Image (cartoon, helix red, strand yellow):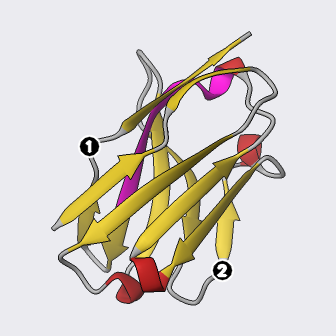
Amino acid sequence: VRLVESGGGLVQAGKSLRLSCAVSGIPFSSYDMAWYRQAPGNQREWVARVIRAGITTYEDSVKGRFTISRDVAKNTVYLQMDSLKPEDTAIYYCNAKLFTTSYWGQGTQVTVSS
């Protein structure tokens, strides 16, 4: 099983980034997909989720700015991040979950400068 994140980088506040997570080794369409993030000194926190039925949910601080989506044909989940803020700086992780089975990617760094 592999989850490979990409798309992170250094951006100025107010700009956008799109993260991608390419998934292999599992039946992608059967899994709920999510993005988490971990800032230095903080615990990993949930950011957004898209379930198998396509319903999306977001953590309050990113509602209206971030959009999660999935492309079943490409086995890829995306996180479009707009109006980025310095407090969005973190390592962003992709997660695939089916009942009690959970897989993680290695993470991609997002740094937002003020």
Residue located beneath label 1 in the image = 106
State the extent of the magenta-drawn residues as a range. Answer: 87-95
Foreground: 87 or 82? 82
In the image, taking residue 26 as reference, residue 95 lies left or right, namely right
Query: Which element carries disc 1, helix, strand or loop?
Result: loop
- Name the residue type under label 2: Ile
The answer to whether 53 is drawn above or below residue 61 in the figure is below
Q: What element carries label 2?
A: loop
The N terminus - image quarter: bottom left
- Whether residue 43 appears in magenta in the rendering, the answer is no
Q: Which mark is residue 91?
A: none
Tell me what residue is drawn at x 38 percent, y 80 percent.
Answer: 31
Residue 55 is marked as 2
List x then y, in percent, for residue 84: 74, 31
Q: Is the magenta stretch mostly helix, strand or loop?
A: strand
The x, y position of residue 62, in whole percent, is 73, 44
Q: Which residue is drawn at 52% across and 78% down?
A: 71
Query: Residue 64 at x, y = what percent?
Result: 84, 51
Residue 19 screen position, x and y as percent: 53, 48
Measuring 56% from the left and 65% from the top, which residue is drawn there? 49
Rendered view: 28 above or below 11: below
> Disc 1 to disc 2, how far (Cα)?
25 Å
Lower sequence index among marks 1 and 2 = 2
